[in-house]
Image: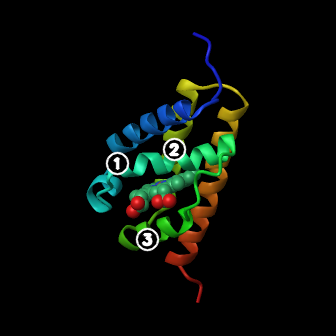
Amino acid sequence: MSMNDITSRADIELLVKEFYAKVRKNETLGYIFDDIIKIDWDHHIPILVDFWETILLDTGSYTRNAMAEHFKVNQKIKLEPLHFATWLNLFDSTVNSYFKGSKADLAKKRAHSIAQILELRMQQFNKPSR
Ligand code: HEM
């Protein structure tokens, strides 16, 4: 079967839903969302779709502050390098199982650069050198 690139909000909805289904089943990450943050998925999924739609299709539908949200998460559970590595592995493998092309590549590239920034900022917060 030949794979298509990411071209629509429906594509991003598929990607986001499949990705978070894997996250929830993952032993390193699942409990953070379901037991610690107790996320309301019906509320959260459209926000994540807006986020990726803004990155990949330039819609501007995401106007929130993802960094601030992760600082709040990090107050309840320290976000460590293993969490980020696991997140990225699941994200890349989800993208690769459904899509192929320049937007698919961009999604993975942006996920890695954002994860790197988040990881660095959480690390700076958790281990201040002062
Ligand atoms: C250590 C890995 C990560 C963990 C454990 C994690 C966990 C979470 C949790 C629990 C929330 C929900 C916060 C809330 O609504 O109370 C959240 C929100 C979010 N996460 Fe992550 N995250 C991780 C990495 C990432 C990365 C790498 C990205 C982007 C590339 C990302 C994008 C987002 C976005 C866009 C939101 C929504 C923020 C908003 O409400 O506007 N996350 N994350």
Task: Tell me the residue at 33%/40% (across/down).
Answer: 25
Is residue 39 placed above or below 93 in the rendered structure?
below
Residue at image x 53%, y 25%? 97
Q: Quadrant of residue 24?
A: top left
Most distant residue in the left direction: 35
Q: Which residue is mark 2?
A: 49
Label 3 lies in ligand 1 vicinity (Cβ under 8 Å): yes
- Amino acid identity at mark 3: Lys
Q: CA distance from mark 2 to mark 1?
A: 12 Å
**Which of the marked residues, 2 or 3, is nearer the chain's N terminus?**
2
36 relative to 57, above or below: below
Q: Amino acid at mark 1?
A: Trp
N-terminal of the two: label 3 or label 1? Answer: 1
The secondary element bearing badge 2 is classed as helix
The secondary structure type at the circle numbered 1 is: helix
Against 50, residue 102 (above or below) is above
Q: Is mark 2 within 8 Å of ligand 1?
A: no
Q: Amino acid at mark 2?
A: Val
Q: Which mark is residue 72?
A: 3
Q: Quadrant of the C terminus?
A: bottom right
- First in sequence: mark 2 vs mark 1: 1
**x then y, percent, for residue 51:** 57, 50
Viewer can see residue 70: yes
Instruction: Answer yes or no: disc 1 within 8 Å of ligand 1.
Output: no
Quarter of the image for the N terminus: give it. Answer: top right
Q: Position of residue 129 (x, y in %)?
A: 59, 84
C-alpha distance separating marks 2 and 3: 21 Å
Q: Residue furthest bottom?
A: 130
Q: Which residue is mark 1?
A: 41
Please tell me whether mark 3 or mark 1 is closer to you in this view: 1
The x and y percentages for residue 37 are 32, 61
Label 1 Cα crowd, 10 Å radius (few <14 / some 14-19 / many 20+): few
